[in-house]
Amino acid sequence: MDYKFEITAKSKKTKARAGKVYTPHGVINTPAFMPIGTLGTVKAMTMRDLTELGAEIILGNTYHLYLRPGHELIKEAGGLHKFIGWDKPILTDSGGFQVFSLAHMRKVTDAGVEFTSHIDGAKHFFTPEKVLEVQTAFGSDIMMPLDECVGYPCKKKEAEEAVARTTRWARKSKVESRALNAGTLFGIVQGATFKDLRKRSAEEIAALDFPGYAIGGLSVGEPQAEMFEMLDIVTGILPDKAPRHLMGVGYASDILGAIKLGADLFDCVIPTRLARHGSFLTYEGKTSIRLNKLEKDFTPIDPECDCYACQNFTKAYIRHLFWAREITAMHLLTVHNLRFFMRMMAKVRQEIASGEF
């Protein structure tokens, strides 16, 4: 199956749309949430769990997988899908965000990024070409080019330089992608929270005519209203015919607001990280399983939820497991939190199709 995107329904009141992304490893129904499988696994989950939860795509991390176990080993194993035992689509990011978040361990130049491994202190250098070579070894269905993400707040000059660099690297990446006969390459829009820079970046990246687009540099500490304002500018410029991936956004209110503004794909560590710290998600928000009031609560996390955790266990039991430091508690909370996101996205897709969203 070749890559293709089709829109199946549009909201009459907002920019929201439902669609399908076709990839060599299957179809992704959008809007979609991608669980994060940083190191080739979604924390506390097996691939069977993810399939049962309804996940149609997971995200892998180029920076982490390059450092350990290494792209050459993964290639020798038959590619990332085979190595990790996942037969559905995989999107890999370029490592740009990790390099940004490890600011004290890296140096950015026009040629690429020099960084120090957080594992053993060894020096490495990522170029636009190198990250595509690595992702091609993985056999990723959707790949991201090297980009430069800046923090919040930041000086305009810094954001401007990052936009220029991101565009230059996008051009190089497109050429390299063709040379490698790689998987589907998305373009990435940057620009921090400066309207003119977001507009410029979106126009420059859209002009390169990628089959899909990612919107980076949001959800890095800016207020929600600013994030939505930037997203609105960008989705007004990016072509309708391609999917739009809002990177790293994972709170339900952020996702629902972003869908209204025309975003299609989302990824975030929020559901899995919250679970490991003892929190579960419902439409009422986030609740800690550690609360004393749940000690004798013999009801499921969410009576409406069809996940394994909610169908079989009570809050009292999961709370007991958490305080006893049993790993099963983290597993069950992760199962629930990810299923909550999958159910929410299915509901949104249905509402867009019926005109109720």
Image (cartoon, grey):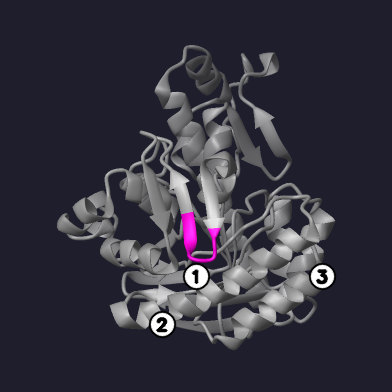
Q: Are marks 2 and 3 in contact (CB under 8 Å)?
A: no
Q: What element carries label 2?
A: helix
Report whether residue 128 is seen: yes
In depth, the one of 119 and 264 nearer the eye is 119
Rendering coords of residue 275 (x, y %): 54, 33
In depth, the one of 21 and 300 nearer the eye is 21
Above or below for 201 versus 228: below
Query: Is residue 112 shown in magenta?
Result: yes
Q: Give the range drawn in magenta.
A: 109-113
Q: Give, as a three-letter code, the residue at label 3.
A: Lys
Q: Mark 3 points at which residue?
A: 195
- In the rendered structure, find residue 29 and report the number of the disc placed on it: 1
Packing grade of label 2 (10 A; few <14, some 14-19, many >=20) is few
Q: Mark 2 points at which residue?
A: 175
Rendering coords of residue 70 (x, y %): 27, 49
Occupied quadrant, residue 149? bottom right
Report whether residue 56 is seen: no
Image quarter of the N terminus? bottom left
Q: Which of marks 2 and 3 is in front?
A: 2
Q: What element carries label 1?
A: strand
Q: Are marks 1 and 3 in contact (CB under 8 Å)?
A: no
Q: Give, as a three-letter code, the residue at label 1.
A: Asn
